[in-house]
Image: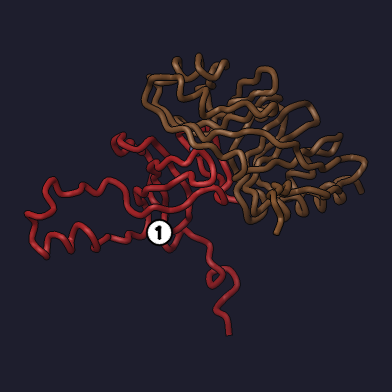
Chain colours: A red, B brown
Amino acid sequence: MLLIHCPYCEEERSELEFRHGGDAHIARPTNIADISDEEFEEFFFLRDNPKGLIFERWRHVHGCGRFFNAARDTVSDKFYASYKAGEPKPDLPGISPATEKTVETYEATEGTAK
Amino acid sequence: MAEQSLRKAPLGGFHGGSAAAHVTAAGPATRLSLRAGADAVPALSKALGLDLPTKPKTSASLNGRHALWLGPDEWLVIDESGADLTALAAKAAVLHSAVDISHRNTAVLVAGTKAAEAIASGSPHDLSPKVFPVGACARTVLGKIEVVIFRTGEQEYRVECWRSFAPYAFALLAEGAEDAGL
Ligand SMILES: [Zn+2]
């Protein structure tokens, strides 16, 4: 079972207690009525969907109920760090996000399914 | 036409478990869902007559009244003697939200040498004494539902769940208790 560290409960808890909340650190426009449709599209819909390191919002919905942020690798699913909402992105020295090559897949270890 | 309405206990008549883990329905209690900022904690503690815990997963108990930390600004207050908790909280002249959930919740009591195993059959929460000593509490999941687990003794747990989920919670815990007793 994947364990996720909640910065408010100050411990690792089962993934069953959490819910994903999309990309973190997206600044809401100060006056949303002032921005163009294209800017709104950029703000509201467009995401990078990177392969590797991503900063995301998570909610400890079946625990303390809090939203927090976490740095996760989208390929290996490894959580590098979690931190309270409102705090800046943490420095993650020495972290080289996994690539497709470093991840064990069924295809790589067992051959292609026929 | 009936001239009076009777409140049915959500788990009236339920019994189960094993010699190693008894599963019983808790008696009626009043309950409060309390939300407040850190600055309101002293006044609310005074009004409720017990110190609201501010450390994660801890509780405070006095004479059958319990305050359980659920989140940084959220507590579940339970009074087993049926005190009017909303009226008590209202005496605190500080900004807070107090919602009476006495009948939204009910509780299942699990007790015995294998009580922790019975609960662990359906919950991922770590109940080992080092991280979940007597007095510890946590909102977590049990099977497909959300519960609050409160360790009331070395071998005693109170599992709070929503009323409509109570038969499910009871059946799952009773099943777990039977397995733990094998
Ligand atoms: Zn939490």
Q: Residue furthest bottom?
A: A114
Residue at image location 63% in from the left, 32% down from the top: B137
Is the C-beta of the residue carrying label 1 under 8 Å from the nearest atom of ligand 1? no
User: Which residue in the protein does label 1 denote?
Assistant: A99
Q: Nearer the viewer, residue A11 or B24?
A: B24
Q: Nearer the viewer, residue B23 or B5?
A: B5
Judge whether B149 appears above or below B58 on screen: below
Q: Residues within 10 Å of mark 1 (few under 14, many from 20)?
A: some
- Residue A44: image location, x then y, percent: 23, 59
Residue at image location 15% in from the left, 49% down from the top: A29
Residue at image location 64% in from the left, 54% down from the top: B164
Judge whether B15 appears above or below A10 on screen: below
- Residue B155: image location, x then y, percent: 80, 30
Q: Is residue B174 left or right of residue A33?
A: right
Quarter where residue B130 is shown: top right
Residue at image location 86% in from the left, 48% down from the top: B16
- Residue B153: image location, x then y, percent: 76, 26
Q: Is residue A94 left or right of residue A9?
A: left
Instruction: Count all numbered tags in the image, as a single digit.
Output: 1
Judge whether B27 appears above or below B9 on screen: above
- Residue B14: image location, x then y, percent: 82, 50
Q: Nearer the viewer, residue A9 or B64?
A: B64
Q: Nearer the viewer, residue B128 or B17?
A: B17
Quarter where residue B160 is shown: top right
Q: Is residue B71 left or right of residue B59?
A: left
Tell me the amino acid under the disc marked 1: Thr
Q: Which quadrant does the C terminus of chain A fall into?
A: bottom right
Chain identifier of the residue bearing label 1 in the image: A
Q: Secondary structure at mark 1?
A: loop
